[in-house]
Image (cartoon, rainbow, N blue to C red):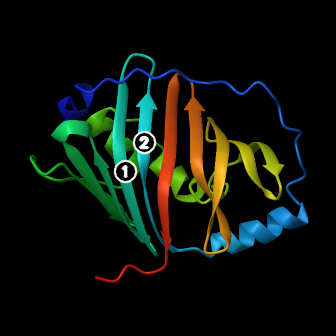
């Protein structure tokens, strides 16, 4: 399964932020209001582009993520028909299916994805981070706010930069998010947000 993604190495240059935002008190009223509003979003779909670089290998994929309460479906599609994988899970576990080999099951989505494809993507944390929220299951490191929204965050060994937000149904949600841990860079650009239940 890993060869589908290894054969598409794309070199991209990591950019570094040259300014440091001041640390703002996490009890800021505007942040509390925004955090409570966004935490209520349990039904959403995003379409975007994902780039992962571990220093020696790079991947570039289209990504879709459909979250319906406790259930999610994430699709990662490599360019030029090189392959795709689907993660379908809930609070009890996750199934990874590449459409060619037998589906794989595990309790932990991050470990399953890495062991099967080599991709180090913190899916469990991204469930919160894509909405601009800290993961309550991780200890907070440095947290920087801007206009009542997350600008930078350190959690689980990851350094996160929320580069851009967009208005979605009167709610500010990230549409450009950079993550780094050790030599791994993850960049997510969200092209489209949809809030609410998905009806067939």
Residue 34 position, x and y percent, is 75, 67
Figure quadrant of residue 105: bottom left
Q: Is residue 116 left or right of residue 14?
A: left
Q: Give neighbour class at mark 1: few <14, some 14-19, many 20+ (Cα, 10 Å).
A: many
Question: Which quarter of the figure is the N terminus placed in?
Answer: top left
Q: Is residue 86 left or right of residue 34?
A: left
Q: CA distance from mark 1 to mark 2?
A: 6 Å
Secondary-structure class at tag 1: strand
Q: Quick one: 88 or 33, which is closer to the camera?
A: 33
Q: Residue furthest top?
A: 56
Secondary-structure class at tag 2: strand
Residue 171 position, x and y percent, is 66, 70
First of labels 1, 2 by sequence position: 2
Placement of 73 over or under 145, stated as above or below: below
Question: Which quarter of the figure is the C terminus placed in?
Answer: bottom left
Q: Is residue 82 in sight in this rendering? A: no
The residue that disc 2 covers is 50
- CB atoms of marks 1 and 2 within 8 Å: yes
The residue that disc 1 covers is 63
Residue name at image x 61 percent, y 55 percent: 174
Residue name at image x 89 percent, y 48 percent: 24
Residue 80 position, x and y percent, is 20, 37
Residue name at image x 13 percent, y 51 percent: 99
Placement of 135 over or under 141, stated as above or below: below
Q: Is residue 12 in sight in this rendering? A: yes
Placement of 88 over or under 24, stated as above or below: below
Q: Give neighbour class at mark 2: few <14, some 14-19, many 20+ (Cα, 10 Å).
A: many
């Amino acid at each position: 399964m890993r060869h589908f993604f290894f054969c598409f190495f794309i070199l991209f240059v990591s950019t570094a932020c040259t300014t440091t935002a001041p640390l703002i008190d996490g009890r800021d009223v505007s942040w509390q209001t925004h955090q409570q509003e966004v935490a209520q979003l349990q039904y959403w779909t995003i379409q975007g582009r994902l780039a992962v670089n571990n220093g020696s290998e790079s991947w570039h994929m289209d990504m879709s993520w459909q979250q319906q309460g406790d259930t999610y479906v994430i699709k990662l599609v490599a360019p030029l028909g090189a392959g795709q994988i689907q993660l379908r899970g809930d609070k009890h576990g996750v199934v990874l299916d590449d459409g060619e080999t037998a589906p794989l099951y595990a309790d932990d989505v991050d470990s399953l994805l890495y062991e099967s494809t080599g991709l180090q993507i913190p899916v469990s944390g991204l469930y919160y981070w894509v909405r601009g929220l800290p993961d309550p299951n991780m200890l907070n490191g440095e947290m920087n706010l801007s206009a009542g929204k997350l600008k930078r965050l350190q959690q689980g060994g990851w350094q996160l930069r929320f580069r851009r937000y967009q208005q979605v149904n009167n709610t500010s949600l990230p549409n450009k998010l950079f993550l780094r841990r050790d030599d791994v860079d993850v960049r997510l650009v969200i092209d489209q947000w949809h809030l609410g239940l998905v009806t067939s």
